[in-house]
Image: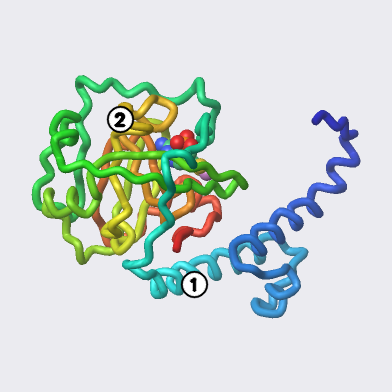
Amino acid sequence: MDEPVKEPKRRLVAPQSELIRLERRLFLKQGLSLGALTLLSGCDVTDTDSVQKALWTMSRWNDRVQAAIFDPDKLAPEYPESAITKPFPFNAYYPEAKAPRVEGAGYKLELGGMIRDKKPWTLPELYALPQSSQITRHICVEGWSAIGKWSGVRFRTFLERIGADLSAKYVGFKCADDYYTSIDMPTALHPQTLLTFRFADQILPTAYGFPMKLRIPTKLGFKNPKYITAMFVTNDNPGGYWEDQGYNWFSGL
Ligand SMILES: Nc1nc2c(c(=O)[nH]1)N[C@H]1C(S)=C(S)[C@@H](COP(=O)(O)O)O[C@H]1N2
Ligand SMILES: [Mo]
């Protein structure tokens, strides 16, 4: 849609649409209206800066509440093969043609932080770990969802194998693009959280994150890093690409 907007008019509507954006975020993420936020925070909603600050405070509060009510035994729904979405959508903060092409032969997964054995892992070593599969729904905050089949090692199994400190708070991920994200340890240990190397029974294609994607069906799509090159265990929240721009950090069940 190309709607020509004249320069002066655009400048006039800009602050208004910023507020509409904020209101939408507030409503989506906290189930709140701008009016309710005004009452709760006492800040002037026409002052975008203080609204942003209040949003951040509430988002952090929300993370704590969500982490507290996280149920490690609650499973995301699984589906039959017939429910798989074809074609499965690609998504990233750039178009598909720009997806990073990781060289499999020389690849090594780097480990850091609170991990006993930080020896880097090659792909053949990772493929030799016990593998399991899931058919689950990937839900993107942008408003689409799709069912896919991923296979790989239970992340808990891998964390145990490398001697990760399971009492630490976070696991952080670095990716071959400039993406990064992090998750809470209870979610890392959840039985459906898989470090996956296959999509639809084939080695992960570039689009879906070769050489690996952390598949977490209990979290929104942006908490599922593709093209992982490094991971580390830490007690300092590493944030994330979208999280640092205001998306709720926990974003999960
Ligand atoms: N490295 C990396 N991982 C990423 C992203 C990204 O841009 N880079 N985008 C996230 C988002 S927002 C979504 S919805 C899913 C999309 O995964 P798909 O391409 O397999 O559908 O990847 C997530 N993981
Ligand atoms: Mo997404």
On screen, 207 above or below 253?
above
Residue 163: x and y, percent? 11, 54
* Quadrant in which the N terminus appears: top right
In which quadrant of the rendered view does residue 233 lie? bottom left
Q: Are marks 1 and 2 in contact (CB under 8 Å)?
A: no
Could you tell whether 23 is left or right of 131 in the image? right
Regarding residue 27, the answer to whether it shows in the image is yes
Residue 61: which numbered mark, if any? 1
Residue 180: x and y, percent? 39, 43
Residue 211: which numbered mark, if any? 2
Could you tell whether 93 is left or right of 236 in the image? right
Q: Residues within 10 Å of mark 1 (few under 14, many from 20)?
A: few
The residue nearer to you, when weighing 251 against 154, is 154
Q: Residues within 10 Å of mark 2 (few under 14, many from 20)?
A: many
Residue 14: x and y, percent? 80, 47
Residue depicted at 41% across the width and 74% down the height: 69
Q: CA distance from mark 1 to mark 2?
A: 35 Å
Residue depicted at 29% across the width and 34% down the height: 197
The residue nearer to you, when weighing 67 against 131, is 131
Residue 209: which numbered mark, if any? none
On screen, 128 above or below 154?
above
The numbered mark, 1 or 2, whose residue comes first in the sequence reads 1
Residue depicted at 60% across the width and 67% down the height: 30
Residue depicted at 43% across the width and 48% down the height: 79
The residue nearer to you, when weighing 246 against 162, is 162
In which quadrant of the rendered view does residue 204 lie? top left
The residue type indicated by label 2 comes to Pro
